[in-house]
Amino acid sequence: MNTTVEFIKSKLNNFVPEIAIVLGSGLGELADEYCDLAIPYSEIPNFIKSTVKGHKGRLVFAKINGKNVVMMQGRNHFYEGHTMQEITYPIKVLHALGVKTLILTNAAGAVNESYKPSDLMIITDHINNMGANPLIGPNDESLGERFPDMSEVYNKELVKLAEECAKKLEIDVQKGVYWANSGPNYETPSEIKMIRQLGGDAVGMSTVPEAIVANYCKMNILGISCISNAASSDNGEKLSHEEVIDTTNKAKIKFKSLVLQIVADL
């Protein structure tokens, strides 16, 4: 990891990021608007190039509302064939660069029947149904404990702050539990019924491995899902990645406003 960290630091001219934002599908425009320096993943030693549509694959550094911020403009996913350790490697790098607060964002399908497309959901907890864990393997004591506590992965003070920011901006937000599946297929109607019965409010294919590693590294974590679609049901409607991108594009104005307000008030 030292090679990666030193390469990035060599580009930063003593800029030390304090906040990191992982921008999910269709949400990368924030990094286009605020960009003092961009480094493509393909140039960073040991980083994997992002391949999913809607993910540019760049580390973007910027001063936003007086805060030093680094944004991951796109992420890698377990379903692309990478290992859990590979997709969470950037989180360890962000920690090594000095990041204390991590904002994880994603596009997710609604499981809670009161949610509608383009809603924003503040994540209060998650359920890992991906069949793997990024902490499996030898433990690095310099990063975290062998058996990390998971009783408050998503920082309650940050959840409260996000709610206050949404209220200030007159943006209605949901709060709920994010359920992570491996993907890449969407869920069947029966799987959605199961997730609902087991306590999931929204379902996606990312975020949880990153949250596990960030919690392991004792970072303060906030999670926000953009509800991109109603998850599979019995009504015969088909789901597509294009629909996900289209809905997140519609929601991006309020998403960007909320994230910018959170950064300002941190």
Image (tube, grey):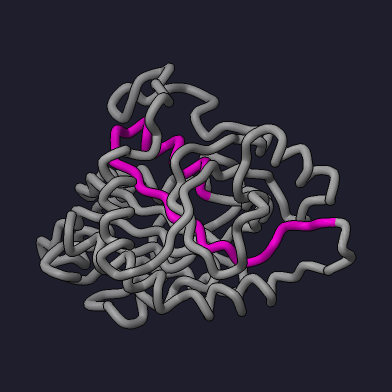
x%, y% of residue 103? 35, 53
Which residue shows up at 42% across the image and 37% down it? Answer: 213
Q: Is residue 263 above or below residue 156?
A: below
In this rendering, would 165 be left or right of 249? left
* Numbered range of the magenta stretch: 207-233
**Displayed quadrant of residue 191:** top right
The answer to whether residue 46 is visible is: no
Membership of 183 in magenta stretch: no
x%, y% of residue 7? 27, 58
Q: Nearer the viewer, residue 33 or 230?
A: 230
x%, y% of residue 54? 56, 74
Q: Is residue 256 above or below residue 9?
A: below
Which residue shows up at 42% across the image and 68% down it? Answer: 73
The answer to whether residue 181 is visible is: yes
Which residue shows up at 47% across the image and 71% down it? Answer: 27
In this rendering, would 221 be left or right of 176? left
Quarter of the C terminus within the rendering = bottom left
